[in-house]
Amino acid sequence: MRIPGRLLAEALRSLFRRRATILYPYRELDKIHLPEGFRGRIEFDRAKCIGCQLCFRVCPARAIEMIEDEKGKRPIFYIYKCIYCAQCAEVCPTKAISMSKTFENIALRKEDLVVR
Amino acid sequence: MSFEIPIGPQHPIHVEPLMLRLTVEGELIVDVDVDVSYIHKGIEKALETRPYIQGLYLVERICGICNAAHSLCYCLNIEQLLGKEAPPRAKYLRIIVEELSRIHSHLLWLGHYFHTLGFETLFMYFWRDRERVMDMLELITGNRVITSYNTIGGVRRDLAPEAEQNLRRALDYIEERMRYYEKVIDSEPTILARTQGVGILKPEDAVKMGAVGPHLRASRIKHDIRLDDPYSGHDEVPFNVVTWDTCDCYARIKVRVREVYECVNMIRYALDHIPSGDYRLKIPSFFKTPPGESLARVEAPRGELVHYSISDGGEKPYRYRVRTPTLANLLSVTEMLRSRGDYEVYIADVPAILGGIDPCICCSARIVITDEARRRRMTMTLDDIIRLSRERRVEKR
């Protein structure tokens, strides 16, 4: 049977329901629930790093560069190139790399998007 | 007296660049020419320059919506080259994520399709409910869209028990909503008027034109890679292949709606019967594959997806080839858009017909020829390639 306007009841019900969207930029940040294991901005623990270069070699986006410091070889991460695949965190033998829940990776200066 | 109307490469009815050259007589379309080669990305060539582990993430980016299918197909290929097989638990987890992304893709398509028909309300509802599926994908894999879940030799993370509870609740919600939407679709005169009897593709034409996936199943052909060539434990999970008899745009809607139910049931079954054990094989990050070739087929949300690779024994593929479902389906669009006999196609039907195949153009553009000597780039059509191959043959003689 064809009843035109079957959606009307649903539309009226939606009128009194909670808003489905989040007023995200600047407001209602507390409504964003990120699950455990979310792949966000890379966090790096220099103390654990042994300079094995595995992260540098697996990175598909070539967002990792190896440099020398007083302790030896270490990676630096260019977040603006990162594709958030977490392969570097997965291969890291000492778990020096982890993915945080920070998803707002926008900055006015390029240096702010480099994890050292 | 006939005119030629170009629709594209940029046009409001297309989401992606696609050129349709329609030859019209009045309102009636008599001929059509399709050109997809506007967004060539060079992914196949790029894959030849990367180790296998990096290629995995590149392959996911062929298509954002079917990324789970692309990465699964890539992993199956490399596992085949290595002569290994994912553990049983990984196979079930792969099914869960694959079917979730199929639900998400079908909901996206349904919403978008009603948007092209001008039914914005339903578009909003579908996309609202799709968010629930995206949240589930985020919960299981760590990201909403690009899942990065499959890896060579299994999956990258296990399913947490609390995630399972959430997933079951979301499945109940999706199923209930889909039952309601199906009633709406069946009873809404505007949808029926725009889709019933429009874009008819007869079963024999569909096979002749090489259509795949839900598009082919809407033409009454029972064809599903999950059934014909179970690639990831699909022989253990029961499901029905949904087909519809009317062969028109309405059938394509119905097939996708019904497929969502099947996906929901498959995920439920997989959750109930998931074996315990390892979820991935221990494979080093960098490895060499034995020389050889491999071919894997996966039922992506849009249809049969084929990946083919040749290995010369190195750390990188020697050649990698991708055949996406949209490329197979686009040919049948030319058949559907051509009026013949009592079958009449009008310009106003173009969005409905083109939308019906779930086009994903950015996956499809594959051939670009760069002539360095003359500093020019050109895309080749099938005719050009056939002509070239014939000339070459004459030269050889």
Image (cartoon, coloured by chain):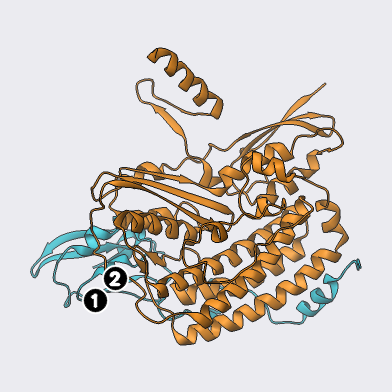
What kind of residue is marked 2? Ala
Q: Marks 1 and 2: same chain?
A: yes
Q: Measured along the vertical axis of the image, is residue B252 above or below residue B205?
A: below
Three-letter amino acid code at the position of disc 1: Lys
Q: Which disc, if any, is residue A95?
A: 1
Task: Say whether disc 1 or disc 2 marks the residue closer to the N-terminus.
Answer: 2
Element under label 1? loop
Q: Position of residue B5 (x, y in %)?
A: 73, 31
Q: Closest to the observer: B243 or A33?
A: B243
Residue at horizontal 56 percent and vertical 25 percent from the top = B383
Q: Residues within 10 Å of mark 2 (few under 14, many from 20)?
A: many
Chain B representation colour:
orange
Q: Decide: marks 1, 2 in contact (CB < 8 A)?
A: yes
Camera-side residue of A90 and B227: B227
B234 lies above or below B218: below
Q: Residue at x 29, y 70 (%)?
A: A90
Q: Position of residue B251 (x, y in %)?
A: 75, 56
Direction from residue A27 to residue B244 in the image, left or right: right
Query: Which numbered disc covers residue A89?
Result: 2
How far is the residue under mark 1 from the one under mark 2?
Answer: 7 Å
Report the residue at 84% width, 34% height from top: B27
Chain A, chosen colour in render: cyan
Position of B111 compared to B196: left or right?
A: left
